[in-house]
Amino acid sequence: MSENKEELNEEQVNQEEVEQTVEEQEQACENQDESCEAKELTPEEKIAELEAKLKESEDKYFRVHADFENIKKRLEKEKYQAIDYASEKFAKDLLMPIDTLEMALAAEEAAKELPAEELLAKLKEGVELTIKNFYTAFEKHDISIIETDGEFDPNFHDAVMQVDSENHKTGEIVQVMQKGYKFKDRLLRASMVSIAN
């Protein structure tokens, strides 16, 4: 019996809530005549309104999609330009050593009257300056010479021959025939070395 009373009370509470909600909506309609009139549209008007909203949404979608495609194309173009011109700074830094070599060649005319020993000394000085300019450019771009002191490392050294040496232990580098270089942590060229037997 008490359960039936509780169910009836719940139904009454639910019914009162629904009636209260309806009353609030009616009061809201009285306060806003336009919104209430808009709710009383014919089916054809509702369809037209929904089609207009759909068209507006489609237009927004197509505009956003077009913007996205344009951005995508622009980023793709910039990516390929960045790849194509990635070595531009390095190339600019190599211009200085080339200028030094060209100046040495241009100075040949003035050096004809110099004695051979003095000419050789100036030539040596010019070559040393050019090499220094190359190493400055290399250092600027994280290109370094591979160390050849001590043990042979097959990751960075290329053994072209083995020699007998009393001054070196077996496996140590005896002589460097060609310097090796690495770019940051990546090998550009292995050092060509001879190692002790």
Image (tube, rainbow, N blue to C red):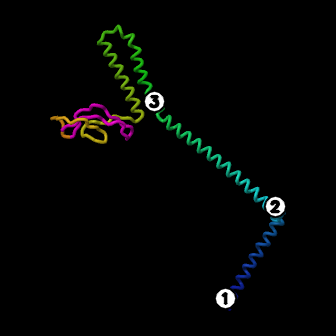
- Mark 3 touching mark 1, by CB under 8 A? no
Instruction: For the N terminus, give its image quadrant.
Output: bottom right
Image depth: mark 2 or mark 1 in front: 2
Identify the element where label 3 is drawn.
helix
Q: Tell me the residue that label 2 is attached to.
A: 45
Q: Which mark is residue 91?
A: 3
Task: Determine the image quadrant of residue 160.
Answer: top left
- Mark found first going from the N terminus, 3 or 1: 1
Residue at 42% x, 33% y is: 140
Could you tell me what secondary structure mostly forms the magenta stretch? strand
Answer few, some or many: residues within 10 Å of disc 1's Cα (few below 14, many 20 plus, some between 14 and 19). few
Task: Determine the image quadrant of residue 191.
Answer: top left
Instruction: State the image coordinates of residue 156 (x, y, percent, origin top left).
Output: 31, 39
Residue at 34% x, 19% y is: 125
Identify the element where label 2 is drawn.
helix
* Magenta highlight range: 171-197
Instruction: State the image coordinates of residue 159 (x, y, percent, origin top left).
Output: 26, 37
Q: Which mark is residue 3?
A: 1
Answer few, some or many: residues within 10 Å of disc 2's Cα (few below 14, many 20 plus, some between 14 and 19). few
Task: Say left or right for 88 vs 177.
Answer: right
